[in-house]
Amino acid sequence: MSNLELRFPPISVFAGFAVLIWVAAIVLPGDVNLHGAETAFLVIGIGAGGYFGITGLSEFRRARTTTSPSHPENASAIVTEGVYSKTRNPMYLGLQLILLGWAVFQGNLFAIPLALGFAAYITAFQIKPEEALLEENFGKEYLAYKARVRRWM
């Protein structure tokens, strides 16, 4: 973890952003009436986010590599199959989609930019340091993977 800038586990960062979005929707002006569609956005966000998160986790387990975001240096393989052929970070993408669904559900103009703040934060403090470790450990193989698969989608 010495190479990682993130001081909090990604699931804690996710929970913090979820609470921040909820509080902001209560205290900030900018309410938006979605005429009942907000629940559908929440369900879609949870469904899509759950799909990416669970699929990404199961691909890591199938490859018998670490699933711990705190110890990417323990990665024993680069997973490039399945959902990893579409996004390099399906587990983080899953959390982001859930947060976006939650933000729309709150019905406040400030909620969505706050939800997108998760992507900016996790990219800077978790994903980029992970990528540096993977480049160091897997070299050209990881660089080739990065060249053909987008970070988010």
Image (tube, rainbow, N blue to C red):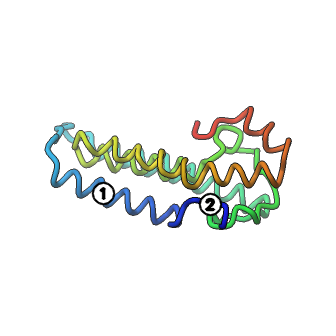
Residue 43 is left or right of residue 9, and the answer is: left
Residue 142 is left or right of residue 95, and the answer is: right
Number of numbered discs present? Answer: 2
Residue 116 is left or right of residue 108, and the answer is: right
Mark 1 surroundings: few (<14), some (14-19) or many (≥20) residues within 10 A: some
Query: In the picture shown, does residue 90 fall above or below 76?
Result: above
Residue 4's disc number: 2
Q: Which residue is mark 1?
A: 20
Which residue does the image show at 63% across and 53% down from the upper left? 55
Residue 115 is left or right of residue 109, and the answer is: right
Residue type of the residue flagged with mark 2: Leu
Q: How far is disc 2 from disc 1 in space, using C-alphas?
A: 24 Å
- Identify which residue, 49 or 20, lies in the foreground: 20
Residue type of the residue flagged with mark 1: Leu
Q: Element under label 1?
A: helix
Q: Position of residue 128 (x, y in %)?
A: 62, 48
